[in-house]
Structures are given as C-alpha cells and as structure tokens.
Amino acid sequence: QVQLQESGPGLVKPAGTLSLTCDVSGYSIKSGFYWGWMRQPPGKGLEWIGSIHHSGGTYHQSSLKSRVSISMETSKNQISLELTSVTAADTATYYCGRSRFGIGLFDPWGQGILVTVSA
Amino acid sequence: EIVLTQSPGTLSLSPGERATLSCRASQRVTSSYLAWYQQKPGQAPRLLISDAADRATGIPDRFSGSGSGTDFTLTINRLEPEDFAVYYCQQYATSPFSFGPGTKVDIK
C-alpha cells in the first residue's frame, strides 16, 4: 500500500524559497505513475501545482510556472517541490499525491504540511 | 483553462437524507475525466469517484456520480454521520488540472 509523507520547514520568510520533500513508501517511484503537488490556503479550496514522471515529463500550473520546480530523487524514493520568491499568498497546506491515472487524478494523498510565509 | 463551479456552496441536511451536489465546467470535460473528493477537517482529500461515475476502492455504494460534457452530479443516498464534510470536483482531462470551490455538507 503506497503511502506519502510531506516534510520541510513550516515557516519561510517572504522572498525566500519554499522547499518540501515527499517520502514515498510501498511503491518505487521509478516504476511508473505521475506524482504531483497540490496546495490549499487556510480555509480555502484546492490548487494543483504540478506533476512529474520518472521519464522526465513535467506539467505545471501556468500561474506558478516561473517559480516552481518539481523533481524526483529515485534513489531516495522522494519527490521534491521548490517554490521561489514566496509571498504571504503562498501560505497553505501543501500535499503530495500519486496520480492513479494520467497526470492529474490523485489517489492517495499525503497528510499535508502547513507552510506559513511570514517574517 | 477549465473553470469548475460547484453548487450549492453549503447544503444543510439531516442524517438519512439524500444529498445532490452539482459541478459545472466552463467547457466540455473530455472523456468525462471528472473526479469527486471528500475532505474532512484536518485531513487530506480522499478520492470518491473518478471518470464521473466510477467509485474508488472501498467507497460505499451510497455514493454515486453521474454526468458528462459540462454538467456533473455527486449523489449521496441516506447520509451517514461520517458523510458531513466538504466535497470537491476536479477535472483531470486538460492541464492545468482544476478543482471546484467545494460544497460543504453540514448537519441541519
């Protein structure tokens, strides 16, 4: 049974870089599937950030594309997210997930990690 | 970009009643690649329905999805106490993959 766990700093300063890792267990990420990141600002709805495949295919939310980098470390079975030049609007719970079909149908999800952007 | 609209914003019902949730897309969702997720406070979203009508593994049959094109519906028959939550629709047909704003089903 595949499980995902997000980790990283819970507080990032404005203009800094948000860096998160998603540890995957129960499945080798180099075996297939797209893997993605989503976020949810406090009290608000969900937003897809981007998805990546071990073959190198990546897709990103257009509004974030210039600031987002998603990568995979297959030796560690990890997915990573970097978001640069953060502002308070990037404060959210960040989730990683496996796309069970195609690029953007996520099941399961990690439990999520709250990242606050504040000085 | 496909924009999803959900209605109503909040649905107040009693246990045992039927819930009918609507999701409308700004353009046709190819191949009915439309999913429904359930989210409870402090938890990650949980996939309920994919391909507009296919229940995910372990999802009770009181949950059903229907629709095609631009109009989709999630129906919950005989609401159980654990069904009171927020429900999101999502299209995974066309990047950027988008979510609706959610419908909250709360206890009347």
Image: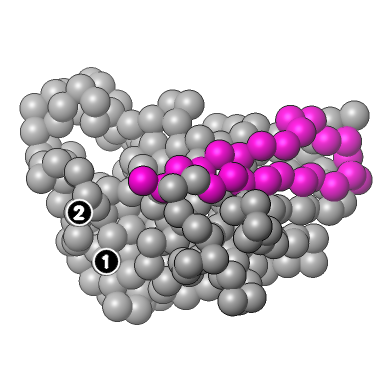
The chain holding disc 1 is B
Asked whether the viewer can see residue B22, the reply is no
Q: From the top left corner, tell me how far across and down residue A44 is, in percent.
A: 55, 39
Q: Residue furthest front?
A: A75
Residue where numbered disc 2 is placed: B55
Q: Which mark is residue A75?
A: none
Locate residue B54: give its quadrant. Answer: bottom left
**A11 to A73, vertically: above or below:** above
Q: Is residue A44 magenta?
A: no
**B106 to B31, vertically: above or below:** above
Residue where numbered disc 1 is placed: B51
Residue in the picture at 29% in, 33% down: B105
Q: Magenta part of the protein: which range?
A: A1-24
In three-dimensional space, the C-alpha distance between marks 1 and 2, rounded to whole angstroms, equals: 9 Å
Locate residue B25: give its quadrant. Answer: bottom left
Q: Is residue A13 magenta?
A: yes
Residue flagged by tag 2: what amino acid is it? Arg
Q: From the top left corner, tell me how far across and down residue A19 is, in percent.
A: 77, 46
Q: From the top left corner, tell me how far across and down residue A23 is, in percent.
A: 59, 45
Front position in the image: A18 or B38: A18
